[in-house]
């Protein structure tokens, strides 16, 4: 293709209203020959994917699919009747952490990291075949959406147990402060099969509410939900509320999920699965 000049890209940062995902706004110089502009976002070091297009007279683009507190880089080029321009300079920015929402189905290429705003805070979590899998170390593997911070939180995810012969735990993290301070709603399988709402302070777990439940079917997904509003926490299973607890230990934080074995050891465990994480934070 013939190269037809280049563009200059500038990046403006804006923060969205509550309960809407954070956003980044790009602007660039126009090209008189442009028929449209192609916007690309970096997905790994030096590798870009197209995220949108604008018409010939539109020299700005709003990317609303950006969790807060995560840096994203972009480049733009114009399509003309003669071919494409060279790419613009690369511009990077980070949207502020705060209220927002996310739906992540993990439908992206296999990767050793989760991407899309996730920060792994313990163990190993990866994407395989469009689902989250954890490492085989016998421990809890956890990741958070550090850019979603607020007090009112409603989150959910689907989980599946690959092996029910050991104690396994599938959890959601709310008002997460750091690896030793947060609330969690979780399902534990194995010999002790329960649903629990717990508070973890300085690494010490206090069970706020618990109820016995039968083990899930092996390899069958179940939906776990956790909601916190004021001092009230609610755990739901497959859309039905199962536990309610009251506590004032944490007033604000981020959200995330965890899965693996609550008992550390030298042996390995099979890699269990998670999918379709949803969160709304205010």
Image: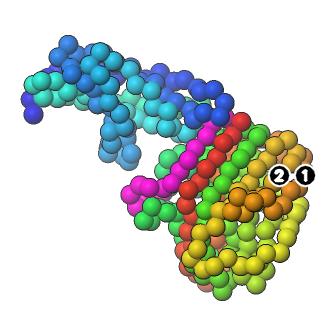
Q: Are marks 2 and 1 in contact (CB under 8 Å)?
A: yes
Residue reaching furthest to the bottom: 165
Q: CA distance from mark 2 to mark 1?
A: 6 Å
Question: Helix, strand, or loop for circle 2?
Answer: strand
Quadrant where the C terminus lies?
top right
Magenta stretch: dominant SS? loop
Image location of residue 96, percent across then percent down:
59, 31
Magenta residues? Answer: 99-113
Residue marked by disc 2 = 233
Q: Is residue 140 above or below residue 12?
A: below
Callout 1 crowding tier (Cα within 10 Å): few <14, some 14–19, many ≥20: some
Quadrant where the N terminus lies?
top left
Any part of residue 259 in sight? no
Q: How many marks?
A: 2
The residue at the point 79 percent across, 68 percent down is 195
Image location of residue 240, percent across then percent down:
75, 60
Q: Is residue 47 above or below residue 9?
A: below
């Amino acid at each position: 293709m013939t190269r037809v000049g280049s563009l200059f890209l500038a990046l403006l940062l804006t923060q969205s209203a509550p309960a809407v995902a954070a956003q980044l706004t790009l602007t660039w110089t126009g090209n008189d020959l442009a028929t449209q502009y192609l916007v690309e976002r970096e997905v790994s070091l030096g590798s870009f994917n197209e995220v949108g297009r604008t018409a010939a007279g539109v020299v700005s683009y709003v990317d609303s699919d950006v969790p807060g507190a995560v840096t994203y880089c972009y480049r733009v080029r114009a399509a003309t009747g003669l071919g494409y321009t060279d790419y613009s300079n690369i511009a990077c920015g980070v949207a502020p952490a705060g209220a927002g929402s996310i739906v992540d189905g993990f439908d992206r290429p296999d990767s050793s990291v989760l991407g899309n705003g996730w920060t792994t805070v313990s163990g190993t979590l990866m994407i395989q075949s469009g689902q989250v899998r954890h490492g085989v170390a016998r421990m809890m593997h956890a990741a958070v959406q550090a850019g979603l911070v607020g007090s009112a939180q409603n989150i959910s995810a689907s989980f599946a147990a690959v092996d029910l012969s050991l104690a396994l735990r599938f959890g959601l993290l709310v008002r997460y402060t750091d690896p030793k301070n947060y609330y969690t709603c979780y399902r534990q399988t194995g010999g002790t099969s329960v649903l629990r709402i717990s508070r973890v302070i300085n690494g010490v777990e206090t069970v706020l509410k618990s109820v016995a439940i039968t083990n899930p079917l092996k390899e069958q997904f179940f939906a776990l939900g956790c909601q916190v509003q004021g001092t009230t926490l609610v755990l739901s299973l497959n859309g039905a509320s199962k536990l309610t607890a009251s506590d004032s230990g944490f007033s604000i934080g981020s959200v995330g999920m965890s899965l693996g074995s609550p008992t550390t050891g030298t042996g390995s465990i099979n890699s269990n699965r998670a999918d379709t994480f949803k969160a709304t934070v205010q």
